[in-house]
Amino acid sequence: MSDPADVYQAVSEEVSTVLVGNEPIIERLTIAALTGGHVLLEGVPGVAKTTIADLFARALGLDFRRIQMTPDILPADITGTQMYREQTGEFQVQRGPVFANLVLADEINRATPKTQSALLEAMQERQVTIEGETLTLPTPFMVIATQNPIEYEGTFALPEAQRDRFQFKLVVDVPEAGDERTMLNRFDDEPGLGPESVSQVVEPDALLAARREVEEVHVSPKVKEYILSVISATRTASDIEYGASPRTSLMLLNAGKAHAAIRGREYALPADIKAIVPDVLRHRLVLNTDAVLSDRSIESVVDDILGMTPAPEAQLDVPQPDEQSLAGGETAGAEATEGADD
């Protein structure tokens, strides 16, 4: 199973045996896993943020570690340290919980800025340095962090440099009435249902192969220009103090490829980019004072940016099919034109 669409379908179906609703969250987590991205989950207590991360790791068969962030946790508690072994008379590296495929930093904003920064090198360079020794992290490597939007006492807001490392910020909402009713019935019928009920459905080699498939997704010059136009608009919008960084452009490009791939396409459309822009931008943009005093939200500002940044309307530069797939090529061209108008 190396097809990104098959990977997403398998993970989504397996996770849904426990999780009710939140399918868009699983889709974005899959996109992050396929592109080497990290995810920030925000939601009130009790909406299954930790459970989502655990379920996702189990379905992919990833080594999963959870770090409960608190004000007294130290950087060495995350990365590791050197321990003296009396038997050998030597110091030996004791690796921390960051040495895993999927690391959950639970309530990340409860840790001090010094401890939060311990994840910066890991998230960007896929390595950590312990007492001058640089150690490579496992492949794949992914960080999912959670935070609570309603309790700020005793918390430390993530600095811009830290937020910029996250590919997506996803909001986990309270379930709708129908989903919550389904949840009650499901757990009433199976009281022992939990993350351990989920089985691995994707082999690690298959995930890496699917990543390579995503890398090969075609992105036309017009779609790339659309990405640049959206990013440029964040830097000139009147409500924004600080716009998106060049790293954001790359994350939009890669996430757009994965968004197309899990839909079975070998090329990205403007609609792929437009669909993921809110999740890529909402934690990166900093509103200016006037916007804050006017009670503007990041989401409304992003909607304005998308509204004033037209997507390409002309026929996109889709790779031409060979003679054996000519009929399918006509369908692809039509879909490309339709997606350009979204």
Image: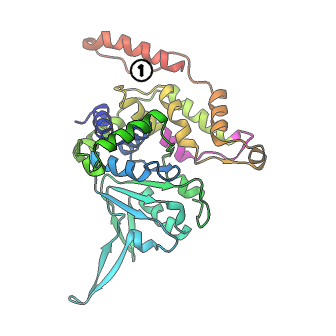
Please name whichever residue, 91 or 302, is drawn nearer the observer in this view of the structure.
302
Q: Which residue is mark 1?
A: 318
Where residue 250 sits: x, y (%)?
Answer: 49, 42
Relative placement, left or right, of 275 versus 207 is right
Q: Amino acid at mark 1?
A: Val
Give the residue drawn at x 52%, y 49%.
Answer: 43
- The quarter of the rendered structure image containing the C terminus is top right
For residue 330, above or below residue 73:
above
- Name the element at disc 1: loop
Relative placement, left or right, of 14 versus 219 is left
The quadrant holding residue 325 is top left
Give the residue drawn at x 60%, y 54%.
Answer: 150
Relative placement, left or right, of 199 versus 4 is left
Give the residue drawn at x 47%, y 51%.
Answer: 46
For residue 162, above or below residue 182:
below
Rate crowding at label 1 as few (under 14), some (14 to 19) or many (20 or more) other CA atoms within 10 Å: some
Let me know if residue 241 is in the magenta part: yes
Please name whichever residue, 113 or 177, is drawn nearer the observer in this view of the structure.
177
Give the residue drawn at x 54%, y 18%.
Answer: 341
Please name whichever residue, 5 or 135, is drawn nearer the observer in this view of the structure.
5
Where residue 339 sits: x, y (%)?
Answer: 48, 20
Where residue 220 sits: x, y (%)?
Answer: 46, 26
- The quarter of the rendered structure image containing the N terminus is top left
Let me know if residue 194 is in the magenta part: no
Where residue 145 sits: x, y (%)?
Answer: 46, 55
Q: Which residues are magenta?
A: 236-252
